[in-house]
Amino acid sequence: KWTATAGADFKYPLANGGAVNANANIYHNDGFYWEATNRFGQPAFTLVNATVGYTFPGERVNVSAWGRNLGNTYHQNYHVLSSFGRVVSDAEPRMYGVTATIEY
């Protein structure tokens, strides 16, 4: 089956010497089975992530708001089948936050 990834970055310089920046990416997976007998599968899923931020004049300080898994799509990180049963790890749900960075 298919997987695909696409992304875009945008930076717009401002007259004060700062800049507005943004990026977004999308990942699609058509689904797959976790083991050879095809009993336990991961259905198709799509993830969308985005960030928008401001870089202050001098380019040393940046503040960004970000979001991951914006569609709150359920999918699994891993799935293990053993003689003791199944172990499944769900991936993170929608997450968002603010990040500030300072470069010295």
Image: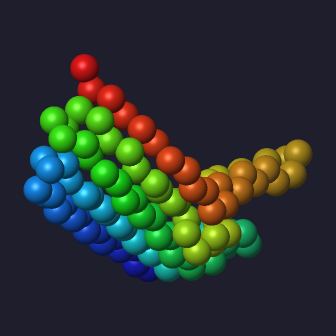
What percent of the width, then of the height, locates residue 32? 56, 72
Task: Give the number of callouts.
Answer: 0
* Left or right, residue 78 beside residue 67: right
Which of the 4 image quarters holds residue 12? bottom left
Q: Is residue 65 above or below residue 2?
A: above
Which corner quadrant holds the C terminus? top left
What percent of the width, then of the height, locates residue 9? 23, 63
What percent of the width, then of the height, locates residue 3? 40, 73
**Residue closest to the far front:** 16
Which of the 4 image quarters holds residue 41? bottom right
Which corner quadrant holds the N terminus? bottom left
Residue at the location (50% across, 70% down)? 47
Residue in the foreground of this view, choosing between 51 and 36:
51
Residue at the location (25% across, 68% down)? 8
Q: Is residue 58 visible?
A: yes
Q: Is residue 31 visible?
A: no
Residue at the location (45% across, 75% down)? 28
